[in-house]
Every structure is written in C-alpha cells, then in structure tokens.
Image (cartoon, rainbow, N blue to C red):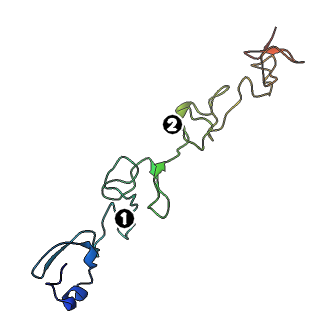
Amino acid sequence: MYSHIPKAVRQSLFLNPARWSAAVGLAVLCTGCPTGEPVCGDGIVDAVEECDDGNPYGGDGCDAQCAIEEGYACAASGSEPCTPASVCGDGILTSNEECDDGELNGTGYNKCTPQCTLGPYCGDGVVYPEIEQCDDGVNDGTGSGACYPGCVRN
C-alpha cells in the first residue's frame, strides 16, 4: 500500500502503517499517532493535566483544558468521571448526605444537622418533650403508643 516509501524510512519514523491516512512522497500524515505532546481529551492524564475524562468538553467536572471544574471532585487517576463535590451546607443534596438545608443546617427541630445528617424530627422514634407529645417512629395512630401524625396523642 505504501510501498513507494522505503521500508527504512517507514521504520525510522516509528509510525504504524495502519494509521497512515495519506502518503505523498516522504510526507506522511498520520491519524492517532502519538506526538509526545499532552492531548487534553485523550483519556490519559499527563503531567500538566489535573484530569482527562476522554472528551474535550467542559461542564462534566473536567474542563476543556483538563482542569478540575469548581464544585467537582475527580479521582486521583484523573481518567475516571468527575462527580459533584460534596459540600455540606451548600444546600445541594449529594449521595453521601442524608440532608442539606444550606444555611439552615443545625438551626433546630426538623432541620438538618451541621454534618448533613437528619436532625431531630417527628417520626425518628425519639420523644422531644418540649416539642412532641409522643413519637413511636410510625405515628399513624395504631399500636400500643397510639401516637398520631404530628407526634401528638389523640
């Protein structure tokens, strides 16, 4: 196929002939050949890249310059998909948070704690005497406690 290019020249170029897309004389165009330069979007995290998710687009945690976007966290390998960073108190519920009420975290009953775990609430099975008359964890008016919705006795 490219027999007009001497074998010694082909070998000295360290190119895989299967990747050649055109050859004119000794000028060879190559698609997918390594250049030695970092390429953002190739899925390989080079020394100058924070991440490389295999695409050249931003908005997914790894931007078009292979830098981690604000609000995202990326795996140390850098080639794994980035995920929204979990920031307790930002008002955005992420998979490792039970709740996130933003600035209201830790402000009282039926609110999220400062650690983004569920705070005291009606139905948690714990009676808070200053707020609840009862709390059997079900609060549907049945059972031995007969606690009703709203943690009240009827």
Where's residue 42, x and y in %? 34, 63
**Helix, strand or loop for disc 1:** loop
Along the viewing direction, whichever of 77 and 98 lies nearer the viewer: 77
**Image vertical order of residue 119 relative to residue 24, above or below:** above
Q: Say which residue label 1 marks.
A: 49
**Helix, strand or loop for disc 2:** loop
Looking at the rendered structure, which numbered label has been put on residue 7? none
Looking at the image, which residue sits at the far right? 144
Q: Amino acid type of disc 2?
A: Ile
Looking at the image, which residue sits at the far left? 25
Choose top left, top right, bottom left or bottom right for residue 154.
top right
Residue located at (52% from left, 44% from top)? 87
Looking at the rendered structure, which numbered label has been put on residue 92? 2
**Image vertical order of residue 86 relative to residue 124, above or below:** below
Where's residue 127, x and y in %? 80, 24
Looking at the image, which residue sits at the far bottom? 8
Residue located at (30% from left, 58% from top)? 65
Residue located at (81% from left, 19% from top)? 134
Q: Amino acid type of disc 1?
A: Glu
Give the left or right position of residue 83, taking residue 55 as reference: right
Where's residue 113, x and y in %? 64, 36
**Image vertical order of residue 18 relative to residue 7, above or below:** above
